[in-house]
Amino acid sequence: MRLNSGTFWRVFCGLKSHFDAAYLNFLAWFDPSQLCGGLHLTGPVSPLQGITGSFGAAIHGLNTPQLTDGVINRSKRMMLDTLGVGLIGTRTAVFNKALTYSQLLRSDERSSVWGKSELTLPSHYAAFVNGIAVHSMDFDDTWHPATHPSGAVLPALLALAETLPRQPSGLDLLLAFNVGIEVQGRLMRFSREAYDIPERFHPPSVVGVMGSAAASAKLLGLSPEQCGHALAIAASSAGAPLANAATQTKPLHIGNAARRGLEAAQLAGMGLEGNPAILDMNCGFGVYYKDYSPSAMAGSASADFKWILEDQDVAFKRIPAHLGMHWVVDAALAARAKLENTVGNFDLSQIRQVTLRVPPSKYIDCPFPATEHQARHSFQFNASSALLDNKVTVSSFSGAQINRPALKELLSKVEVETPKDNPPSFDKMYCEVAIETEQGQIHTARCDTFYGHWRKPLSQEDLVEKFSVNASSVLCTEGVEGVIDAIGNIERARECSVLNSYLRMTSSRDEQLYSTGSL
């Protein structure tokens, strides 16, 4: 599909001119923030008024001197982890299916596909497939309120940066990345519902596309009005039902958020407009939350401005599974250790029952998973794998491991309880595992905060080790070490393109092995 940008622009401007007068007359008579609750006649409405206007102004106005050391350090950790899980994600079936589809498309502008030395795609589709790779194993970071903040933003920015006439600096990349993260954090704080494990939609599909749009708008240098319109355009691409969790479609939520947010910013830069009060309205961004209560974003020059990331760190996963699984795995390992201290070894035949006390959440309650994606969302599977193997790793989710007779036998002995004092919140939940033997002995362990949670963050050494293990499955040693060094010094890099050069340093053997596998 080849787009002639000159033809597009002439047609677009011709159509736009017919609607501009009517649109401005509409704004002059009605207050957009009231359109869902009844029409209120008012005077002219400025595009920069209200909550949406405050976001547009802040996105445009934030500058690199406002990046604190704490925010820089935390965002660099997020970038490194995101690249690592994205690289290992290029070995998955869902990534390769999306890549095969995306290669059908053609464009003069091309951006890199992570872990592919020679392959490029149109920038939107590079953002799409790299975003899918990041979430393909559910191995990416998680924030509070609940979302995966980095996967929708970093792939969009790196794809966009390659197409710009002037290469952004490392500081430019850091600033745009943090703008995208900040917008997500503020949007999630418009609702108390967002603080719990989701029930209706996958949060990155809603706030992630807005974060991608904000970050891309910042890197493009859009005006305050254009930044607001980018958010409005992105809002019309938001949303994905939670019914697609635990399927191959869930990683597409991140890929689509990265792609659609980038597209929204570019369309806003070309003059496309959306509702200038999209964040102010219950039938705007408020449709996603039952208790929507938006507030303005402090201006970049305001003494009140503070990055949310400064106070709220993210969680980094040690296993490629839904965040809730980390509690149950740690509790299961501790319960197994107690049993072994008493009887000497873990003997499946001597286990009468395993009881899991977990928070209520239907989409991560999967008694007998049949696929890797179901297994990544199953309290029962992750607890049983930890008990049986005394560990949970990347290979735990292979078909061979999932279909083991011993694992299925143990799964048949698992019961789930949801105590009333165990809320479905990543900030307040706990998991308890009780192993009952045939002799009637019960060995119980509880996890309140797993290692990697924002209350107990991974050490820098362990985070780099996680990245190195993941990235080395795709990149050569020079590429792995190059990414680590580039991220570690990104604020001093004259051009952020150095990252993409390292992300392409993969051996031909690895590319041949994984480029067409498991389709």
Image (cartoon, helix red, strand yellow):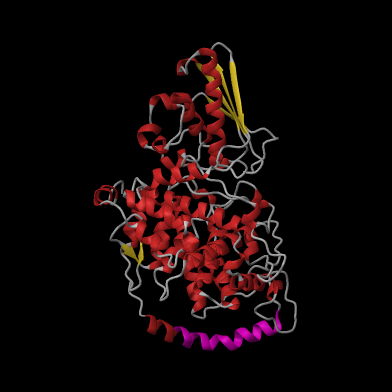
**415 or 135: nearer the eye?**
135
In the image, which residues are magenta? 12-30
Residue sitting at x 35%, y 48%? 93
**341 or 213: nearer the eye?**
341
- Give x and y (percent) for residue 416: 58, 30
Residue sitting at x 31%, y 64%? 104
- Give x and y (percent) for residue 263: 47, 70
Does residue 71 appear to the left or right of 84 in the view shown?
right
Image height check: is 335 above or below 477? above
**Which is the main secondary structure of the residues drawn in magenta?**
helix
Image height check: is 507 above or below 297? above
Which quadrant would residue 298 be assigned to in this image? bottom right
Image height check: is 439 above or below 43? above
Does residue 379 appear to the left or right of 290 in the view shown?
left
Which quadrant would residue 129 be assigned to in this image? bottom left
Answer whether residue 18 is magenta in the image. yes
- Give x and y (percent) for residue 354: 55, 24
Counting labels gives 0
Q: Say whether residue 318 is visible.
A: yes
Quick one: which residue is furthest to the top in this view? 439
- Give x and y (percent) for residue 224: 60, 76
The quadrant the N terminus occupies is: bottom left
Residue sitting at x 51%, y 51%? 77
**315 or 351: nearer the eye?**
315
Answer whether residue 244 is magenta in the image. no
Which quadrant would residue 6 be assigned to in this image? bottom left
Does residue 232 appear to the left or right of 398 in the view shown?
right
Residue sitting at x 30%, y 61%? 119
Q: Say whether residue 237 is visible.
A: no
Does residue 261 appear to the left or right of 125 in the view shown?
right
